[in-house]
Image (cartoon, helix red, strand yellow):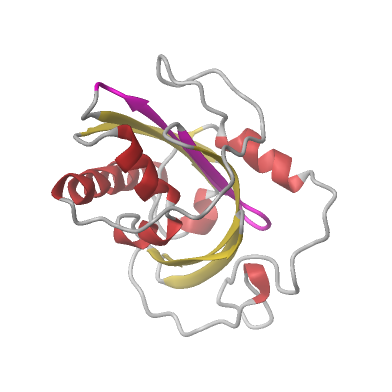
Amino acid sequence: MSMVQQAIEVSAPVHTVYEQLAAFENYPRFMTGVRQVTPIGADQTHWIMDVDGKRREFDAQIIERSPDERVSWSTMEGPLLAETITLRPMGETKTQIVAQLEADIAFLMPSDRHGQESLNRRLKADLTTFKGLVESGVLGGRPIPHGGAVTMGTRSQNLLPGVDAPSPAAVAARIRNRNTPAPSPGAGWDTGVAGTARMGGRTSGADMWGNGMINEEERG
């Protein structure tokens, strides 16, 4: 399992930045490899990604949506993919974004012999793309409705000073340890092998995309 962290400053008010990050439908516009994110409940989304040329689908649980502060999510079953994004206002018109991403690189980039480095580069590139979209006013969309802050999981020591954020691993562990019924048939990542279903039980489509994305610092 690997984790990476990147930070970037965006020339936009914290509320503007939060709204775009809370609208998961926006993620395909700046997150490499993400083709579609669809809300399937108040706190769940269905993702379609391209990972190393293969179509992957999974359901993710939204762990925390604290207005103007933090957005956190994690896969519900299968290979781990979890992210915590923390926002820090830097005055009235600037916002710092700190993104922590944890993932199973073997699943996300199976043929990349420099997976860790590639994930780091991609996370940085994704944040840079997001910055450009927000600052240019191109990125739109409304956040998924919610009834206030939703907080689960635990806090961990920060990787950057002044950022109090739950680690993706802690967030994912809370989901995986819940005593809730398993998702509908087919939970797990689509591996492209006959008889293997992907998370959420969606029917598989033909592989038709390019590279996947993400980043993280090797934890061993």
- Magenta stretch encompasses residue 195: no
Residue 117 visible? The answer is no
- Residue at (67, 75) in percent of width and height: 201
For the residue pair 24 and 6, the one nearer the viewer reads as 24
**Chief secondary structure of the magenta portion:** strand
Q: Residue furthest top?
A: 161
For the residue pair 195 and 164, the one nearer the viewer reads as 164
Quarter of image, res 7? top left
- The quarter of the picture where the C terminus appears is top right
- Residue 101 horizontal/vertical position (percent): 47, 40
Quarter of image, res 88? top left
- Residue 167 horizontal/vertical position (percent): 56, 31
For the residue pair 169 and 96, the one nearer the viewer reads as 96
Residue 180 visible? The answer is yes
Q: Which residues are magenta?
A: 70-91
Drawn side of residue 13 relative to residue 201, left or right: left
Drawn side of residue 159 relative to residue 97, left or right: right
Drawn side of residue 97 relative to residue 186, left or right: left
- Residue at (42, 15) in percent of width and height: 162
Image: 142 above or below 125? below
- Residue at (27, 32) in percent of width and height: 8
- Residue 21 horizontal/vertical position (percent): 39, 47
